[in-house]
């Protein structure tokens, strides 16, 4: 029997929920018979076995070859594999969900500490402790910014209470909106962003190099992901418009700023009853932020019967990230149909 392709996904939390929702939107719905199981399947990818793991364990599993592909946060990747071994390749670095930042946050009562330089001066006066789940990333950042005399304290759970409880003086933690920090009388330093993170797709180099099925699955996932991301916030518009000729309508269309579509609108004659000729059908793609203005412009040139529908996918040429993956694997010569 052929070897299964193993895909690791986050097992819990916002990242886990967002990953399932994102993949379903891409047409890669996860099927899990029992919510307590740690494995699942993807009907669109029948050869793939999904394995649920903690986000911070996924980079290590991919690096060791225990799984072939994985989705995790960039923060976990940077923390667990700080030197980014050759065994791990980033296939897609910006999946567009799970956005957050790892920041240095200090008590609001530290009125004289607003920057990393301020923190360095305070640490020079007396030893400080920073509580974090991201020891490697935090230690590197402090060293890069010249902050000395700070001991990194490994902590789990809610870090926001660390200064209040007393086992640390300030924290380095993940935040998305900053609300939790403010509610706990903490504030991020103005230049204290250690890294910005979102979900990434990674793969084991050896599996991608040696197994055609893993590489093919990586490409199929990229195709779905890229087409779905490209379609986000895009709408297909269909409308009827009366005119004497294609050239006449084209002149009207291109006289408007928002009717260009992707490469241009599609125009075709409509089949109508005898004596009701001179009607054309036009369809084009428009962004959500220009949708109303686009419809207004279609009406302005005589359009009617306007139908708008959201777009799920926009497939174009082979994804550029797949070409980059082939180059990283030194498979540039492989044909891309």
Image: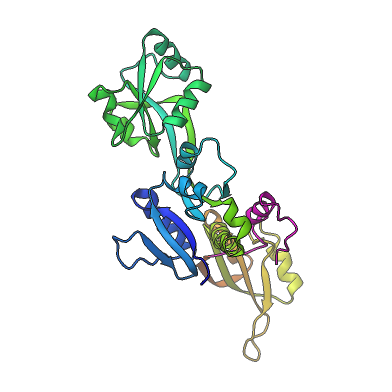
Task: Out of 134 and 98, give the one closest to the viewer.
Answer: 134
Which residue is at the far top? 125
x 26%, y 29%: residue: 161
Magenta region, main secondary structure = loop
Instruction: Using the image, determine if residue 144 lies above or below residue 235.
Output: above
Task: Out of 201 and 247, give the one closest to the viewer.
Answer: 201
Total labels: the figure holds 0
Q: Look at the image and tell me whether residue 200 can be seen.
A: no
Task: Out of 256 and 144, give the one closest to the viewer.
Answer: 144
> Colour scheme of this structure image?
rainbow
Quadrant of the image containing the C terminus: bottom right
Instruction: Using the image, determine if residue 293 lies above or below residue 128.
Output: below
Which residue is at the far bottom? 274
Q: Is residue 137 left or right of residue 294?
A: left
Which residues lie in the magenta part?
Answer: 313-337
Instruction: Check residue 315 for magenta coloring.
Output: yes
Q: Position of residue 36 (x, y in %)?
A: 28, 60
Which residue is at the far front? 1
Q: Look at the image and tell me whether residue 139 can be seen.
A: yes
x 35%, y 59%: residue: 38
Q: Is residue 239 left or right of residue 246?
A: left
Instruction: Using the image, determine if residue 307 lies above or below residue 259.
Output: below
Q: Position of residue 111 (x, y in %)?
A: 35, 15
Quarter assignment of residue 19:
bottom left
Q: Position of residue 155 (x, y in %)?
A: 32, 31
Q: Position of residue 242 (x, y in %)?
A: 65, 76
Quarter assignment of residue 213:
bottom right
Q: Is residue 77 left or right of residue 322?
A: left
Instruction: Check residue 23 for magenta coloring.
Output: no
């Amino acid at each position: 029997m052929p070897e299964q392709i193993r895909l690791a996904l986050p097992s819990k939390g916002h990242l886990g929920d967002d990953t399932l929702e994102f993949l379903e939107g891409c047409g890669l719905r996860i099927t899990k018979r029992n919510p307590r199981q740690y494995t699942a399947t993807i009907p669109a990818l029948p050869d793939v076995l999904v394995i649920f793991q903690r986000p911070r364990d996924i980079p290590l599993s991919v690096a060791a070859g225990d799984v072939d592909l994985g989705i995790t946060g960039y923060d976990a990747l940077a923390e667990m594999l700080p030197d980014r071994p050759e065994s791990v390749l980033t296939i897609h670095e910006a999946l567009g969900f799970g956005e957050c930042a790892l920041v240095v946050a200090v008590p609001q009562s530290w009125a004289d500490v607003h920057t990393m330089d301020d923190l360095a001066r305070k640490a020079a006066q007396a030893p400080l402790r920073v509580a974090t789940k991201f020891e490697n990333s935090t230690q590197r950042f402090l060293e890069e910014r010249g902050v000395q005399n700070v001991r990194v304290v490994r902590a789990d759970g809610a870090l926001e209470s660390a200064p209040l409880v007393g086992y640390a003086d300030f924290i380095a933690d993940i935040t998305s909106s900053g609300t939790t920090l403010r509610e706990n009388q903490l504030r991020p330093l103005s230049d204290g962003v250690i890294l910005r993170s979102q979900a990434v797709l990674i793969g084991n180099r050896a599996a991608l190099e040696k197994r055609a099925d893993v590489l093919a699955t990586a490409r199929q996932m990229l195709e779905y992901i890229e087409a779905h991301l490209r379609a986000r916030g895009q709408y297909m518009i269909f409308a009827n418009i009366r005119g004497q000729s294609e050239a006449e309508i084209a002149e009207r269309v291109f006289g408007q700023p928002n009717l260009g579509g992707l490469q241009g609108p599609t125009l075709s004659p409509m089949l109508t009853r005898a004596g009701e000729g001179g009607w054309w059908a036009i369809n084009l793609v428009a962004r959500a932020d220009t949708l109303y203005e686009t419809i207004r412009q279609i009406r302005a040139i005589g359009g009617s019967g306007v139908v708008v529908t959201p777009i799920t996918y926009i497939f174009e040429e082979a994804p550029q990230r797949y070409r980059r993956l082939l180059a990283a694997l030194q498979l540039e010569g492989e044909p891309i149909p």
